[in-house]
Amino acid sequence: MKKGLVLGKFMPLHTGHLALFEFASKQCDKLTVLLCYTNNEIIPGSVREEWIKSGISKIPNAVIIPYLYDENALPNTSVSSKEISLQWSIAIKQILPEINIIFSSEQYGDYVAEFMDIKHIFFDVERK
């Protein structure tokens, strides 16, 4: 069974994210959208969770998992680096050990896939 992952802050959720969810859902049996948030962000995680729920409402194989994390334990950054990706990969494995594909438009997808020994599928790298 193909179990896919899209992760992010989704702050704000936009049409590119929705297109990514749709793309990813067609390439796996189950898609998990991991909403990563902290209590220090200006748009609360609960608001973003509702946006995502609405956005995936017509994607039957998609589920959302909200993940409140501690910025002292995991970096709150959008920078793609191997060091940061390693830290996040360890956390993701603990939360979602069954994931075998990650979908992203970012270089971190390659790094996370490498550390988790899973496949990475790029989507719309040029943001079209």
Image: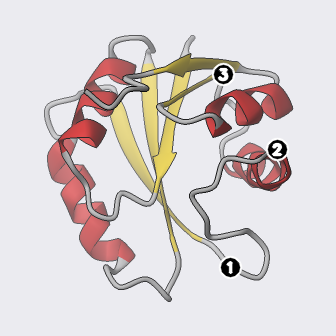
Of callouts 1 and 2, the N-terminal one: 1
- Which residue sits at x=44%, y=60%? 9
Is label 2 in a helix, a strand or a loop? helix
Q: Position of residue 126 (x, y in %)?
A: 37, 26
Q: Which mark is residue 70?
A: 1
Q: Which residue is mark 3?
A: 100
Q: Amino acid at mark 1?
A: Asp
Crowdedness near tag 1: few (<14), some (14–19) or many (≥20) residues, C-alpha within 10 Å? few
Mark 3, Cα crowd under 10 Å, few <14 / some 14-19 / many 20+, is some
* Left/right of residue 122 with respect to residue 79 in the rendered view: left
SS category of the residue bearing label 3 = loop
Residue 68: % across, % down: 55, 72
Marker disc for residue 82: 2
Judge left or right: residue 30 versus residue 93: left
Q: Is residue 15 left or right of residue 82?
A: left
How far apart marks 2 and 3 lie (CA) works out to: 19 Å
* Residues tagged 1 and 3 counted as in contact (Cβ below 8 A): no
Q: Quadrant of residue 16?
A: top left
